[in-house]
Amino acid sequence: KAGCPPESVYYVTILFSVIAGTVRFFFARAQIGFSARRYLRNVIFRIAVMLVAAVPLPLFLRIEVFPEDSLLSFLVICTVSVVCTALAAWAAVLDRSERTATKKMLKDWLRKAFRRGVKRENTAGHGQNM
């Protein structure tokens, strides 16, 4: 109603989030001696590397391969985006101990999921021959 485009709501939300994050950063720095240099190196730099690694392929697919909107383009680009982001996070963001913990968590999750599937298959046939 104010004559602004609909996406301006998102711009305002992002602006307030940046302002709030900056204020939190300065409070943390004053209260616990938070290092800006370490934050830039350990957080911002890793995120930037991940973005540079994860964005080009989905962007290329959107511009060159799937310029028109369709269900197929949506599914392919979403799948490629998730895979690229996961691989970039694995390579650029996680350190050795985090990778080890993530591997263990994924193995445990897959083991549980597979066991549930096997149990369902084994119990599905019982009770049908009455």
Image (tube, rainbow, N blue to C red):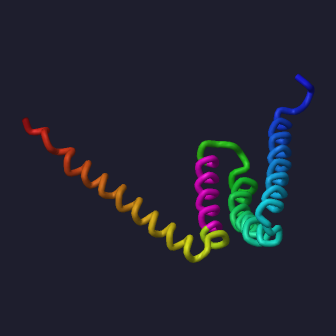
- Of 72 and 104, nearer the camera is 104
Residue at image point 82% right, 71% down: 37
Quadrant of the image containing the C terminus? top left
Q: Position of residue 33 (x, y in %)?
A: 79, 66
Apparent side of residue 84 relative to residue 24 in the rendered image (left or right): left
Q: Among all residues in the image, which is located at the extreme front?
A: 31
The image quadrant of residue 108 is: bottom left
Residue at image point 64% right, 61% down: 85
The image quadrant of residue 129 is: top left
Q: Position of residue 71 (x, y in %)?
A: 60, 43
- Of 17 and 57, nearer the camera is 17
Q: Position of residue 107 (x, y in %)?
A: 41, 66
Q: Read off the magenta span.
A: 73-89
Q: Position of residue 105 (x, y in %)?
A: 46, 64
Q: Among all residues in the image, which is located at the extreme right?
A: 3
The image quadrant of residue 8 is: top right
The secondary structure that most of the magenta stretch takes on is helix
Apparent side of residue 109 relative to residue 74 in the rendered image (left or right): left
Question: Does residue 21 sit above or below 83 in this rendering?
Answer: above
Residue at image point 82% right, 48% down: 20
